[in-house]
Image: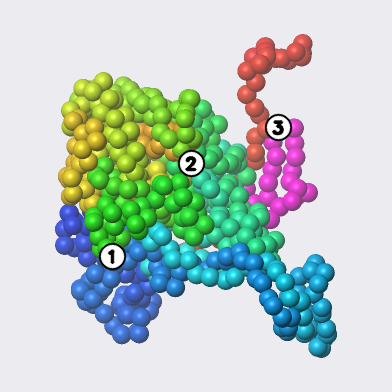
């Protein structure tokens, strides 16, 4: 796994540790804070083991914690938006106006700034090669007047302050979401401890796939956001804005610049369930035997004025006025913004966020052969639509089906006792009044049907916000952290469960809870009726399945091979904890265009790839060729 969100880095469970910080022992708390301080560029190392601050002064580890702890806590997770445009001066905008002038208006302007189509009444006189004088006669004409509009939403789940993924590689006008994708995939490979080239060389290149994307594309100025407003903003569209804005571009970037993969690729969009849609594709591709390795992920960077305004006008976001009304306040402080997201409590809307999350999937045989780490396993992801709807954004019935199927599968694998006592729910938990009612009813009904009386509910958006298509990736990373550390994050903004929440069979809590889990249910309820639930098994439960399937001797041999992989992973983690990231980005390396290939009837050889691509395909349709072999008919 790898990536980044408002809580920190995914690898090494850093982001998870930030969400259960109060429950950790003193040493783990300190190492978490120091790792975040390095990530946020508050401290650095000079190549030795010594720490230094931004001015170059040496620091001891305990001094880092004492000096920067509060700054780290205040500048991670949900908080006041740090973009200056969302501050007191407001967001740059234009307002349409009609001016009436009683006398001729004369002004000077650079020649290239004149409109291509001048109004018929304008008189233009050359001043020199670059400047002209324009005279406008009395009358009325339309103008756009620049202004600053006060931000009505000022809370978001932003990446830790000071961490800029585009600074880690040669990013040239890349949208933020794509820079985050490069970091997330690199972090995933680093955490795995596997050498990607070695892994790739042992496989048919077509046995590898990448399924990655996001829910709404790249909508900042370097992507479609800048493209779509280029005319009205007076800026030129660039040659990169159109292609880099596509929603599948995270997968394209990984294939072209990180992995060099020629296998299957794609991005499945499902609003807030996008991560689970892509995870389902990867799981089913491996289960079918078509792929052996699949990288799955999403990367969303929607904290832009336009996206926020779109959600605000829907009534979906927790805007400033609603937060004030919720708590009867006249002024919002930084502490109030940090409490903006309140799943299953009295709430008023979701808090937008950015995140990049990736997981590396393998079939079990390959994982054992390579000595890969096993952080968990995914036996199934279920997707169902809502059917007939009044409003396209309103929740419906599909989530009852997805969760019901996931629970049925968990019961079949783990048994009744484990299902009832050693599983927990990772709720979509958006912090909207509608969600708290509808999602809790889904949970309650499925719990009643399966004899579950006290089902723990985690809602990680209370910490990191709603990262749109990456939201279930945030939940997945958190669930893997719970397996590793034995803690479930509480819902820190849950002063009390709202009266309309169906809580009879559910267990809500504000503080982290110790829990020995066999499985987690990752739940997503997306706009438009995009419901998905993924079942994730713990490493312990997965190992029991591996023993059952392969035998104890094979599992013991896997653990022996795993030792070297763990050592490699730990070396990566040690560097990452010191802020030494190596984003994998190989621009223009190993480029092939076709003539270099060796094309045969049954395979294609590719220079730089150890194994050829097999052209053998399954034919379930029979053959009309009388000379075909009987086993092909």
Answer above or below: position of 204 versus 253: above
| Residue at image point 64% right, 67% down | 98
Q: CA distance from mark 2 to mark 3?
A: 40 Å
Residue carrying label 1: 331
Which residue is nearer to you in this view: 54 or 227?
A: 227
- Which numbered tag is attached to residue 602? 3
The answer to which of marks 3 and 1 sits earlier in the sequence is 1
Mark 3 packing: few (<14 Cα in 10 Å), some, or many (20+)? few
Corner quadrant of residue 157: bottom left
- Which numbered tag is attached to residue 142? none
Q: Which label sits in the foreground, 2 or 3?
A: 2
Q: Secondary structure at mark 1?
A: loop
Residue carrying label 2: 271
Residue 223 lies, in percent from the top left, at 60, 58
Answer above or below: position of 226 versus 429: below
Residue 389 lies, in percent from the top left, at 47, 28
Residue 345 lies, in percent from the top left, at 24, 44
Q: Is residue 276 magenta?
A: no
Q: Secondary structure at mark 3?
A: loop
Answer left or right for 29 relative to 282: left
Q: Visible in this render: residue 339?
A: yes
Q: Visible in this render: residue 424?
A: no
The C terminus is located in which quarter?
top right
Prevailing secondary structure class for the magenta stretch in the rendered image: loop
Residue that lies at the very extreme toward the front in this rendered image: 102
Q: CA distance from mark 3 to mark 1?
A: 70 Å
Q: Secondary structure at mark 2?
A: loop
Q: Which label sits in the foreground, 2 or 1?
A: 1
Q: CA distance from mark 2 to mark 1?
A: 33 Å
Magenta residues span: 589-609
Residue 352 lies, in percent from the top left, at 41, 53
């Amino acid at each position: 796994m790898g990536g980044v969100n408002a809580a920190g880095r995914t690898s090494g469970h850093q982001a998870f540790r930030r969400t259960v910080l109060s429950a950790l022992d003193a040493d783990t708390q300190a190492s978490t804070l120091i790792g975040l301080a390095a990530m946020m560029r508050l401290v650095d190392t000079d190549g030795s083991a010594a720490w230094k601050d931004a001015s170059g002064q040496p620091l001891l580890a305990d001094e880092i914690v004492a000096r920067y702890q509060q700054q780290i806590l205040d500048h991670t997770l949900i908080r006041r938006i740090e973009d200056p445009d969302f501050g007191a001066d407001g967001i740059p905008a234009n307002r349409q106006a009609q001016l009436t002038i009683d006398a001729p208006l004369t002004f000077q302007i650079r020649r290239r700034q004149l409109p291509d189509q001048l109004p018929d009444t304008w008189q233009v006189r050359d001043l020199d090669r670059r400047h002209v004088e324009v005279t406008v006669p009395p009358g009325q004409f339309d103008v756009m007047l620049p202004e600053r509009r006060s931000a009505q939403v000022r809370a978001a789940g932003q990446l830790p302050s000071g961490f800029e993924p585009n600074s880690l590689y040669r990013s040239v006008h890349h949208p933020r979401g794509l820079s985050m994708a490069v970091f997330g995939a690199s972090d995933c490979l680093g955490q795995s401890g596997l050498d990607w080239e070695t892994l790739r060389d042992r496989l048919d290149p077509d046995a590898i796939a990448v399924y990655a994307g996001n829910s709404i594309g790249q909508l900042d100025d370097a992507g479609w956001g800048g493209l779509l407003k280029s005319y009205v903003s007076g800026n030129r569209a660039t040659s990169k804005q159109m292609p880099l804005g596509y929603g599948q571009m995270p997968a394209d970037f990984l294939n072209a610049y990180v992995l060099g993969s020629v296998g299957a690729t794609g991005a499945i969009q499902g609003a807030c369930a996008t991560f689970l849609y892509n995870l389902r594709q990867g799981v089913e591709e491996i289960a079918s035997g078509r792929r052996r390795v699949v990288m799955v992920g999403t990367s969303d960077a929607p904290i832009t004025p336009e996206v926020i305004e779109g959600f605000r006008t829907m009534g979906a976001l927790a805007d400033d006025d609603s937060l004030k009304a919720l708590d009867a306040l006249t002024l919002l402080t930084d502490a109030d913004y940090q409490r903006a997201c309140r799943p299953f409590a009295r709430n008023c809307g979701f808090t937008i966020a950015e995140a990049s999350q990736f997981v590396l999937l393998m079939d079990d045989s390959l994982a054992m052969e390579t000595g890969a780490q096993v952080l968990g396993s995914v036996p199934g992801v279920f997707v169902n639509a809502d059917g007939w709807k009044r409003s396209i954004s309103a929740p419906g019935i599909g989530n009852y089906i997805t969760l019901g199927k996931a629970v049925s599968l968990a019961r079949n694998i783990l048994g009744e006792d484990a299902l009832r006592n050693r599983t927990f729910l990772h709720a979509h938990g958006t912090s909207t009044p509608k969600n708290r009612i509808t999602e809790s009813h889904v949970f309650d009904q499925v719990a009643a049907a399966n004899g579950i009386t006290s089902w723990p509910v985690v809602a990680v958006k209370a910490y990191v916000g709603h990262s749109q298509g990456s939201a279930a990736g945030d939940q997945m990373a958190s669930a893997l952290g719970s397996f590793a550390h034995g803690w479930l994050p509480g819902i820190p903004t849950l002063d009390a469960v709202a009266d309309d929440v169906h809580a009879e069979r559910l267990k809500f809590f504000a503080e982290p809870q110790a829990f020995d889990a066999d499985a987690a249910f990752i739940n997503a309820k997306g706009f438009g009726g995009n419901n998905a639930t993924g079942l994730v098994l713990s490493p312990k439960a997965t190992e029991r399945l591996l023993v059952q399937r392969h035998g104890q001797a094979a599992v013991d041999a896997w653990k022996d091979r795993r030792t070297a992989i763990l050592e490699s992973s730990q070396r990566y983690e040690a560097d990452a904890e010191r802020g030494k990231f190596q984003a994998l980005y190989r621009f223009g390396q190993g480029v092939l265009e076709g003539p270099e290939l060796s094309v045969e009837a049954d395979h294609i050889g590719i220079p730089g790839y150890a194994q050829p691509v097999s052209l053998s395909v399954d034919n379930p349709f029979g053959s009309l060729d009388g000379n075909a072999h009987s086993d092909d008919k």
